[in-house]
Image (spheres, rainbow, N blue to C red):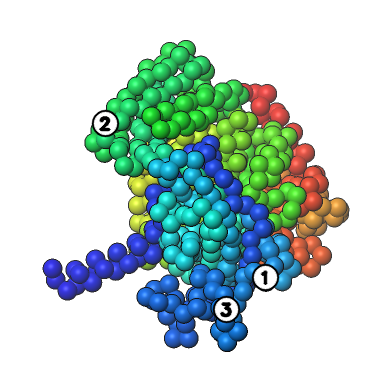
Amino acid sequence: MSKKYTFFLLLILFCFSSIIAQEQLLVNAYNRTSTSLNGNWKYIIDPYENGYYNYRYEPFDQQESPWASAFFLNSKPKNPSDLIEYDFDQMNDLKVPGDWNTQKPELLYYEGTLWYKKSFDYTLTQKENNIFLYFEASNYKTEVYLNGKKLGTHIGGFTPFNFNVTDILKEKDNLLVVKVDNKRLKEAIPTLNTDWWNYGGLTRDVKLIETGSTFIQDYSIQLNPENNQQIKGYIQLKGKNMAQRAISISIPKLNIKKEFKTDDNGYIDFEIPVKKIQYWSDKNPHLYQVILETEEEKLEDQIGFRTIRTKGTQILLNNEPVYLRGISIHEESPFRKGRGYSKTDAQQLLLWAKELGCNYVRLAHYPHNEHMVRLADKMGMLVWEENPVYWTIEWNNPSTYQNAENQLFELITRDKNRASVIIWSMANETPNIPARNKFLNKLAQFTKSQDNTRLISAALEQKNYKDNPFIRTIDDPFANQVDILSFNEYIGWYDGLPEKCKKITWQIEQDKPVIISEFGAGAKKGHYGTKNTRWTEEFQEDLYIETLKMIDGIDKIQGISPWVLVDFRSPRRVLPIIQDGWNRKGVISDDGQKKKAFFILQDYFQKKARTE
Ligand code: GCB
């Protein structure tokens, strides 16, 4: 092997290993036998990463016998003369799940390392079973240590990861130490610059999942996109005896019970004919109970069966045209003013969307928690899910690409059996330059290779058509790769005043369904004035009136998701009295009050729904 080749190989291995050190994700963690590790965890704020590096800036966890100063050891002085300069047990608690920023005033703007510690006991229900430590999300870089041993590193703030800890777990006094670092980095996904709060910490549930010694690792069970009379999929077992094992799939309401045998790699793929099936849709969100059974395990899911595709400029759900009456949503709790994580948070957000008349939500700008898509499945809400490739990232950096791909992969793994999810969005408002085109093309191809039952999109940008400022178009080579042509526009807010909408026409040449992924204006709830006074509810209301009229003139339009359901925190938004750290483009205020624009949109959607 040439030296150059070896160098590149090592570089790739290094980049890869620093990103994907955790193990393959268990699908449907949501319904597995689990024990929650939520609750109070001790914490140490460590801006200098003193518990991670020695004074030569060498990580303790890469040394054969690390000093007692390494926080993951949770060292205690044995003699009065011992020097130990930390003590988790004398520290305060943080609640898990939950961002740290909104739990302690001194952590509101904190971006750096914080250590968590939890002790727990656990007894396996059967000696030969496996036990996994599962994190639903942790922002951003997470190092996990159990009983003094490093389990691995995870990068990315919004997707789940897990570790098989069967060989390390004890019955009593397990010591779990987790280092979470939310420092923004240029090479990261997302990068330094975003318009949302960089909430740090163990932001979603943490749990132990017990599986059989041989267990169901992964599966996909979907309607065949080519044949809506057939359920198609695969199941992957893992563990000690995964070859030639019997698996049954039953869907009682469809009178289906089929037995299969795995191949030598623990894998089966299957096609099951179905006749009288109720298709899942926004109008009839029918979910079937699906039961997978092996000798050792029984795993249930609730799955909807539908097809989604495009034909010319239409979006077809179960072969019927569907218009996406949507709204964009950030994952913030309507109750706690921090990162949302609970079922109640998700329920309130989706109920507001329903009240608006939506049949669709854009979950911006990163993967939201699993409650959102589980509830969307139940409520008949179509969903756009998004990878945090936002604005300008390091397009030429291979490890940045790998990171983006890995985050998307984790999201697809988690949600590939959710009927509500119809769109994977690659990115938001990215520049049209060759390096970005290459990056996004690769990501889109990867996504299609992982999942051919959904559509691909990205929130693109619009521009003047042939230098005419009154005619707008989409001129972006990535438009050729997407199934749905989607773009953000702020005519009337960053671009003139709302009345400008009257003068704009659209020349969209691609033969694809078009959706407007964002438009909006800032308004402070309770701030009233003329329609040309910024920040008033009247200004925002007028922008909605004018924009909706303009949008009706786009003949290919198949949906909208205005910006945004609820005001959300953003450190970029510093205008006193009006913003105070909040982006005010919500049609609902941060304390849950509806602004005038809410009712304009509601009225528009009600009329739209009537014409369906
Ligand atoms: C955008 C971004 C979104 C911002 C929004 C705004 O175009 O996609 O993340 O929050 O504009 O309020 O400016």
Circle 2 residue: 244
Circle 3 residue: 77
Q: Residue at x 48, y 55 (%)?
A: 170
In the foreground, 97 or 316: 97
- The tag earlier along the polypeptide, 1 or 3, is 3
Q: Quick check: 524 left or right of 480?
A: right
Gap in angstroms between the C-alphas marked 2 and 1: 52 Å
Q: Residue at x 42, y 61 (%)?
A: 152
Is any atom of residue 117 visible in this view?
A: yes
In the foreground, 611 or 336: 336
Q: Position of residue 234 (x, y in %)?
A: 35, 32
Under circle 3, the secondary element is: loop
Where is 87 relative to 495, above or below?
below
In the foreground, 345 or 61: 61
Q: Quadrant of residue 107?
A: bottom right
Q: Quick check: 48 left or right of 398?
A: right
Circle 1 residue: 91
Locate the C terminus by quadrant. Answer: top right
Q: Position of residue 495 (x, y in %)?
A: 64, 57
- The tag earlier along the polypeptide, 2 or 1, is 1
- The tag earlier along the polypeptide, 3 or 2, is 3
Under circle 2, the secondary element is: loop
**CB under 8 Å between callouts 2 and 1?**
no
Q: Find the residue positioned furthest to the left.
A: 1
Q: Is mark 3 within 8 Å of ligand 1?
A: no
Gap in angstroms between the C-alphas marked 1 and 3: 16 Å
Is any atom of residue 554 visible in this view?
A: no
The amino acid pointed to by label 2 is Gln
The amino acid pointed to by label 1 is Met
Gap in angstroms between the C-alphas marked 3 and 2: 53 Å
